[in-house]
Amino acid sequence: MPPRPAASPPPASPPAGRPPRPPRPGVPPPAPPSPADQPSVPPLPAEPPSAAPRPATDPPPEEAGPRIERPAPTPRPRGHVGTRPPTYDAEPTALPAADPDDLDDLVADTVLDGARYGACTLRAVSVRGDSARYRGEPRRDALLTARFGTGEHALLLVAMATGARATPGAHRAAAEACHWIGRAVGRSHARLVQDMRDGRRGDLKSGLHRLTDRSLGKLRASASEQGVDPEEYAASLRCLLLSADPECRTRVFFGVGPGGLFRLREGEWQDIEPQVAETKGEPVVGFGSPPAETPEGDRLTMDLGIPTPPSPYEPAPEPPREPFRFRTSVARPGDTLLMCSGGLADPLRGEPELGEYLAERWSRPEPPGLAAFLADSQVRVKGYADDRTAAAVWEA
């Protein structure tokens, strides 16, 4: 019996994308596979008609990820507070006039500084007021931040001064006042740090009073050398001393002239500006009034208010000076201490909405950055257009 020919293998299916070969002549085409030879594919389960179609973008409930809690929205910095916007533009308009032979006399529109030492974080800023920006006048406020010493024995000084209004050299007088007090404090910083650590309040007050008088005396001497009236070449001065030692939380304020010293504690502002003692009431014997008669028994005549001419043998009396202001305070964790010039102190006392806004902004757990502190410090109030200088200290 002749052997059977070997069965030829089934033709391979053409690759995807290639057209099938045409049948050869005399060779019948292969028969299509029967349904029994095809692999069985289970049918797709039908979705119940009651189920609503789900958007393709939403994940199924069993595959949904953890829920993300969005942070509570925080209020954005505001341009101004009050019922009406300020008169001037919010941004600088005109630059001060410059002398090509005295370019060192130019003053920047804004000065910003900051640091962190021990348990406190410092932010300091000085901004030209809206009125000076519009008229092209230099900033009358000056700001000095300095560190004397190293390590835990370092002393931080923040000094700010404001020159007399409507005087051509007001910005120079303010800068010179900060320069003189900075030099005096820097040379005595070791003794001042030790007094702060030991809590010797009396020594601090007498020593800083002496340094302040000496510095302002040099400012008056400089006015005489320039041939300028000392009343015009004058400046108010406010200073803050901080220790870099984390164990020392004593904060020392001293100065001469108007301004503000505030403390933000538990969301509420406290005005802790040291008050100058004033004599109130009518003069009484032994306090503000002369005795009724002399030791020889002569009755004193009535004072007619006629001024006594100055004696040629005595120097002319100096005009009354501003009283010295001094205060020490022990900081608590969470406190914010604010020292500022009159340009910020006046609207803080006169516009409650500004105090509420800054209290909300500066009561947060973390101190603001430099840019945020600048934005907060220049929130404007109608009717207050002077320079603003402020130094704030956040206690950890």
Image: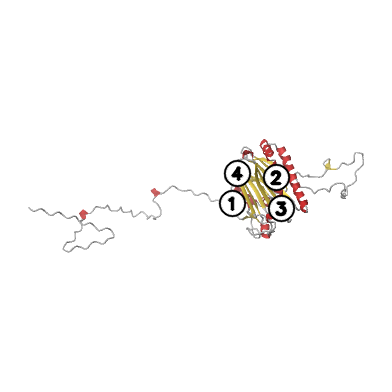
The answer to whether residue 170 of the structure is visible from this angle is yes
Task: Identify the residue at image location x=71%, y=53%.
Answer: 172
Residues marked 4 and 2 touching at CB (< 8 Å): no
Instruction: Determine which residue is flagged by label 1.
Output: 371
Q: Residues within 10 Å of mark 2 (few under 14, many from 20)?
A: few
The mark closer to the camera, 4 or 1, is 4
Q: Nearer the viewer, residue 188 or 36?
A: 188
Q: Position of residue 363 (x, y in %)?
A: 59, 46
Q: CA distance from mark 3 to mark 1?
A: 27 Å
Q: Which mark is residue 172?
A: 3
Q: Residues within 10 Å of mark 3 (few under 14, many from 20)?
A: many
Q: Earlier in the sequence, mark 2 or mark 3?
A: 3
Q: CA distance from mark 4 to mark 3?
A: 29 Å
Q: Earlier in the sequence, mark 4 or mark 1?
A: 4
Residues marked 2 and 3 touching at CB (< 8 Å): no
Q: Earlier in the sequence, mark 1 or mark 2?
A: 2
Task: Identify the residue at image location x=61%, y=52%.
Answer: 374
The answer to whether residue 353 of the structure is visible from this angle is no
